[in-house]
Structures are given as structure tokens and as C-alpha cells.
Image (spheres, rainbow, N blue to C red):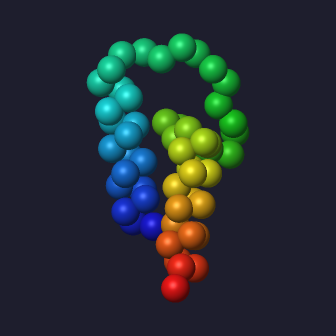
Amino acid sequence: MTAFLHVAASLTAAAATRGPAPARPTPRRAPAGLDPEVVRVWSRMVLAHAHSP
């Protein structure tokens, strides 16, 4: 989980250095700066790794 949050923070920082992105509404449940799609994909990867033999 710590690695996931570190990667998510890195992606957010990288996106901030590129310049402003087009405005789009963010879900109320997602923390500021985290894209729900990124959270969904990383969650699936973590769960797949945890349940692999």
C-alpha cells in the first residue's frame, strides 16, 4: 500500500509539472490529485499480485 501511494504521489507530481490539464469534474470520494482510473488499475494489480501463487 505504501508503494502504491508513493507511485500515485509521483504520478501526481509529474502531472503537475506538465502544466494545467483540461478541467474535468473529480469524484468527491477521490483524494485531490488522484485519478480514479489510476486507483482502479493499481488496485487490480495489487490484488492480482496478492492472490497469485
Q: Is residue 35 left or right of residue 13?
A: right
Q: Is residue 47 above or below residue 20?
A: below
Give percent across and percent down for residue 13: 33, 35
List x then y, in percent, for residue 27.
69, 36
Q: In this rendering, would 8 be left or right of 13?
A: right
Please give left or right for residue 41 compared with residue 25 in the image.
left
The residue most toward the bottom is: 53
Q: How many marks?
A: 0
Identity of the residue furthest to the front in this view: 53
* Front residue of this view, candidates 28 and 44: 44
Identify whether 24 is placed above or below 4: above
Tell me if 20 is positioned left or right of 18 in this view.
right
Task: State the image coordinates of residue 14 (x, y, percent, origin top left).
Answer: 32, 33
Residue drawn at x 52%, y 66% is: 46
Frontmost residue, 11 versus 30: 11
Residue at (53% x, 79% y) in the render: 52
Could you say which quadrant of the image residue 17 lies in?
top left
The quarter in which the N terminus is drawn is bottom left
Taking 50 as reference, is 39 above or below it? above
Residue under the image location 63 percent in, 20 percent down: 24
Q: Residue at x 52, y 55 (%)?
A: 42
Q: Nearer the viewer, residue 29 or 50?
A: 50
